[in-house]
Amino acid sequence: MTHGASSSPARRSVLGAAVLTTAALGIGAGAAQAGERTGGVRPSGGDRGGLPVPTVIAHRGASGYRPEHTLGAYQFALDMGAHVIEQDLVPTKDGHLVCRHENDITGTTDVAAHPEFASRRTTKSVDGVSLTGWFTEDFTLAELKTLRAKERIPGTRQENTLYDGRWTVPTFEEVLQWAEKEGRRRGRPVWLYVETKHPTYFRSIGLGLEERLAKLLRRYGRHRANSPTFLQSFEPTSMERMARLVGTPRVVLLWTPDDRPWDFRESGDPRTVADLVKPDGLDWIAGFAQGVGPLLDLVIPKDANGRLTEPTTLVRDAHARGLVLHPYTMRNENTFLPADFRRGTDPNAYGDVFGAYKAYFATGIDGIFTDNPDTGLLAASDFTA
């Protein structure tokens, strides 16, 4: 039994939203039960067809096996049985929302190999960081579609380079159409987890994300409180803005304790993440969001040697306010794991990832982002067995 899986009506409402969606689509019990078996874990609160706890969220798709934010990565994650598939959104010059982890596409596309775009290489400041490369906001969608996606960290994921050039950069509307098609084929909704990237920056250059996102969510019926979709941002005010536009569940992402969200820096708000994870900060978040997505270190900090210490009170405090808690990010490679669970000396080799999952699941988190959905599903199944 997962600790805290049904302790709060608010959390139960969000995690069980798929039940309402399934009923609305007229999907029978057999299909819902098949969906449960796919993930191998029990649904929250005993709701057939609801999101399982722990929820396994495919971080940028199955990015441990395919270049991130491609339809290939999304499809592979769904075929593995991931409960939710993540997209990060940035705009093109002509206002289309596309799926990239960053607007800097230097390392995730073959743009450098296109001489016709050599003059687009530039240096700009994004959220206070100076970056040199090529950026989505300097390309029309038609131009961006001439590029091909590639593996972002080929030194770590050499096998993924096999798929370099296979897929284009998808628009979010293409992903919504893909999700509709797959939902009909599978007889159950495909859950999406959608992030607004650098929303203050994009608003400052006339390419605001929230209104464009809300328009697409309404067009595809994902604008309601029971929609099979989460929205997320590292800028809390972006989720406040989305709360005024749609009913879709919202999550505030949290980085290191000393981090000040960029929208806070721009507005002069002195609060840091350390303030937001305190009871008063969580109370404020609960006023416009249904969850938090913390860095895993905010759930269990590491010591100076990179080993796990004692869990914080974040899970308990968030649950007390009805907030779903989905930390990030689990990866199989040693280089990404706590020192306790690394095996051997090769940083790119797989470590004891199942041991790490067990430690994090034991804190009572509601789900977890992972680059390796198949591993996450097995770990969740072990934990709830």
Image (cartoon, helix red, strand yellow):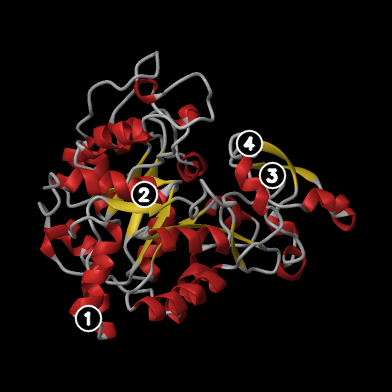
Q: Callout 3: few (<14), some (14-19), or many (20+) C-alpha neighbours within 10 Å?
A: some
Query: For residue 288, what is the image quadrant?
Result: bottom left
Q: Quadrant of residue 90?
A: bottom right
The kind of residue tagged 4 is: Val
Using the numbered discs, state the Cα–Cα distance from disc 3 to disc 2 in whole angstroms.
27 Å
- What residue is rendered at 26% in x and 70% in y? 34
Looking at the image, residue 177 sits to the left or right of residue 314; the answer is right
| Gap between marks 2 and 4 measured at Cα | 22 Å
Of callouts 2 and 4, the N-terminal one: 4
**On the image, numbered disc 1 is attached to which residue?**
23
Q: Residue under circle 3?
A: 107
Q: Are marks 2 and 4 in contact (CB under 8 Å)?
A: no
Q: Identify which residue is drawn at 78% across, 53% down.
A: 111
Check the image and report above or below for 213 versus 6: below
Query: Which of disc 1 and disc 2 is earlier in sequence?
Result: 1
Marks 3, 4: nearer the viewer: 3
Between the C-alphas of marks 3 and 4, the distance is: 16 Å
